[in-house]
Image: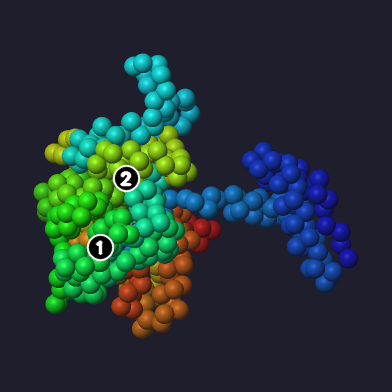
Amino acid sequence: MQRPPSVDAVLRAPAGVLAVARFGRALATDAVRAAIAAARPALREGEAAPGRAALADAAFSKLERSDALSLRPVLNLTGTVLHTNLGRALLAAPAIKAAVAVMAAPAALEYDLNSGARGERDDHVRGLLRELTGAEDALVVNNNAAAVLLALVVLAAGKQTIVSRGELIEIGGAFRMPAIMASAGTRLVEVGTTNRTHKRDYEQAIGADTALLLKVHTSNYRIEGFTADVSPRDLAVIAHAHSLPMMDDLGSGTLLPLDRWGLPKERTVAEAVRDGADLVTFSGDKLLGGPQAGFIVGRAELVARCAQHPLKRALRLDKLRLAALEATLRLYRDPDRLAERLPTLRLLTRPAAQIRAMAEGLVAPMSAWAGPDWRVEVVACRSQIGSGALPVETLESAGLALHPIGGGSGRALAGLAGRLRALSPPVIGAVKDAALRLDLRCLEDPAPLLAALSASLGERAS
Ligand SMILES: *Cc1c(COP(=O)(O)O)cnc(C)c1O
């Protein structure tokens, strides 16, 4: 049996030297040992020993593959703009700049530059939130689930919270309203029925143990047909007549009326405040278009109680997100330029004709990449807003459909979806109606897709 080259000899080959320089001696040595071990069975069969260059190359490629970051950018061609699994909102340029600036330098996070005294971290956004929502006071926490949890703990722990049966939502994954209530230690009292809840249902349920009337935005479904619910304004009136607070969990917080941009109407935070809610909760990374965050805005005395609760400390934001959030909120002061500057709004308002024109330019490169087994065509489609915002409304869009020639087996489609995910950057589409569909609404610049396709073609050719 031939003997393989020594570890040292392999490390001295050009790819070995490169591996040490790039990944460090420890990892390079381990990878070379693994490459040598992998060659041994063939040697025992009597085959010739691989050269040190080949072993070094194998070690280097393996290190390179394992070096790719797990959390990395992808191209979202799913047709869902605010895709929770793909990280929801993209940050605006000023928000990115603000976050980067405070990453590598000390920042006045809890420091008042006017007085030189200690400040509060939420002060960086409190004034903006008051201005944009009309609320007396505001605070910010990790996400809207945290905002709801904190507000329920402060307002209703150990007591009852009344909610309509039509509003006991589950938002993708683990956010279920009854479970959040249980975590907050408040007893859920369900009133009404799935499709109809009336004022008297709430009035009859209020008792000595009631602490809160809660309204929850049915973010990801709509109940239609023979329905009735109590408006937030009427619910606030009922609550106040019994000296109770009313809280409105809006979910996706819109700060400005979206119909201004031709988008479906969604109640704004300012409207919820005006309608009499004592506290309003909403997300930072849904329609608002900022970093992950959750807000509690409303009556000063209640917001202050939330701010002073020990849970607030556990749920607070770090300086990166606060910086990005402040910069995002500032963009809202100039609504005329918002659709240009805020990526979420820019993507939601992209004209279908522009998206279609881009799709037409991508048919040829996509066909060349997909190969002779696939037919590529431009198709009209409908994008979703996503993240439990406006569940029923969709936006006219366009994209590519890749059809397997000779009939679609699910296996072929899954294989193609896998090939798209293996591109760099990975491309995420959706399989629907026996085709792989790529909605191009969220592809503002085709360059990264074209580069990924041609890099992959180049690899196959070499
Ligand atoms: C999305 C949503 C939440 C959870 O918000 P996160 O920011 O994802 O934690 C809570 N309530 C409603 C009504 C929602 O739509």
Q: Residue at x 13, y 58 (%)?
A: 234
- Pick the front one: 303 or 294: 303
- Which image quarter: residue 336? top left
The quadrant in which residue 74 appears is bottom left
Q: Position of residue 454 (x, y in %)?
A: 42, 56
Neighbor class of circle 2 (other Cα within 10 Å; few <14, some 14-19, many 20+) is: many
Q: In the image, what residue occupies the spot 46% across and 42% down?
A: 310
Q: Give the structural element (helix, strand or loop) at label 2.
A: strand
* Residue type at the position of mark 1: Ile
Percent x, y for residue 148?
A: 35, 53
Which image quadrant is residue 249 in?
Answer: bottom left
Instruction: Please state the horizontal and vertical placement of residue 236, each as a whole percent of the image.
Output: 18, 54
Disc 1 on helix, strand or loop? loop
Residue 210 vertical placement versus 95 (above, below)? below
Q: Which residue is mark 2?
A: 295
Q: Which residue is mark 1?
A: 206
- Name the residue rendered at 45%, 45% in the picture: 311
Which of the two residues, 63 or 233, is positioned nearer the viewer here?
A: 233
Whether ligand 1 has any atom under 8 Å from the Cβ at mark 2 is answered as no
Numbered circle sitting on residue 441 = none
Does residue 407 appear in the picture of this structure? yes
Query: Could you classify mark 1 by the number of other residues whose Cα lies within 10 Å: few (under 14), some (14-19), or many (20 or more)?
Result: many
**Which part of the image, by quadrant, shows the C terminus?**
bottom right
The amino acid sitting under disc 2 is: Phe
Depth order, front residue of 460/449: 449
Mark before the other along the chain sequence, 2 or 1: 1
Direction top: furthest residue: 115
Residue sitting at 83 percent across and 57 percent down? 4
The quadrant of the image that shows the N terminus is bottom right
Q: Is residue 332 left or right of residue 54?
A: left
